[in-house]
Image: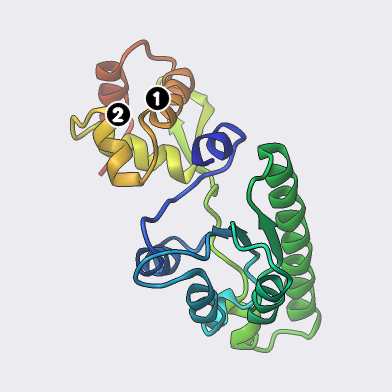
């Protein structure tokens, strides 16, 4: 599922249990959560309860993807704050459509909140309005190449993370372990970096990054 969503253009962070998921949510501020109910340390219900207690994540879309499909289980999920309850087995295309729909709706809600906060004048926005807007996982980082001043290199946050680790000499598998992504997904990001930097191998990427101050 992670690979499918990555190949569909999403940045995905995975967790082995509910407790790790909660810590990653605080760290990455995702735009959406897809979670099972049966998980060690913190089950899906408990995870959603903890997430909803955080002002920044009150509007965060949550999808339950689980084998528990009884009416009682679904009602409990919705009462705790999930946006959609998708029982297993499921089709990847359906999950992708669900995610796209929830993200589009969430973006419209955030835009309305931002408009409302600016429409009220220069006063300081309330904490709910400020914190409800999640940090973007795809904010581009623009770097001007000295060899071509008119060209600007745009790196997504994930591409920058891969580049930072790539310059330390890590393999795709090692980078994937650090970013909770598959080696195949890392290979996709490396290919994107090769294309954007117009280089032909990893060594040239590293040299390009150092010469153009793309890494610290």
- Locate residue 125 relative to residue 209 in the image: left or right: right
Q: Tell me if label 2 and label 1 are in contact, CB under 8 Å.
A: yes
Q: Position of residue 75 (x, y in %)?
A: 72, 76
Could you tell me which secondary element the residue under label 2 belongs to?
Answer: helix
| Outermost residue, left side | 169
Instruction: Pick the residue in front: 18 or 153.
Output: 18
Give the mark nearest the N terminus, 2 or 1.
Answer: 2
Could you tell me which secondary element the residue under label 1 belongs to?
Answer: helix
184 above or below 71? above
Q: Residue at x 66, y 77 (%)?
A: 81
Q: Residue at x 29, y 19 (%)?
A: 202
58 above or below 95? below
| Outermost residue, front side | 70
Q: Residue at x 39, y 62 (%)?
A: 24
Q: Which residue is mark 2?
A: 172
Check disc 2: other Cα within 10 Å, few if <14, some if 14-19, many if 20+. Answer: many
Check disc 1: other Cα within 10 Å, few if <14, some if 14-19, many if 20+. Answer: some
Q: Position of residue 142 (x, y in %)?
A: 50, 40
């Amino acid at each position: 599922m992670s690979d499918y969503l990555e190949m569909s253009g999403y940045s995905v962070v995975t967790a082995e249990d509910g407790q790790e998921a909660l810590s990653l949510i605080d760290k990455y501020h995702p735009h959406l959560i897809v979670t099972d109910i049966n998980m060690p340390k913190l089950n899906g219900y408990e995870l959603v309860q903890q997430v909803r207690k955080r002002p920044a994540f009150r509007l965060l879309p949550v999808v339950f993807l689980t084998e528990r499909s009884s009416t009682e289980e679904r009602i409990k999920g919705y009462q705790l704050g999930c946006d959609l309850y998708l029982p297993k087995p499921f089709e990847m295309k359906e999950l992708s459509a669900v995610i796209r729909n929830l993200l589009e709706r969430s973006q419209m809600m955030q835009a309305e909140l931002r408009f409302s906060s600016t429409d009220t004048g220069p006063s300081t926005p309330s904490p709910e309005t400020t914190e409800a807007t999640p940090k973007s996982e795809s904010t581009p980082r623009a770097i001007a190449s000295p060899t071509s001043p008119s060209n600007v290199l745009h790196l997504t946050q994930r591409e920058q993370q891969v580049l930072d680790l790539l310059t330390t000499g890590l393999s795709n598998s090692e980078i994937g372990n650090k970013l909770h992504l598959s080696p195949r997904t890392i290979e996709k990001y490396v290919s994107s970096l090769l294309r954007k930097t117009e280089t032909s191998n990893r060594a040239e990427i590293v040299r390009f990054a150092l010469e153009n101050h793309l890494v610290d």
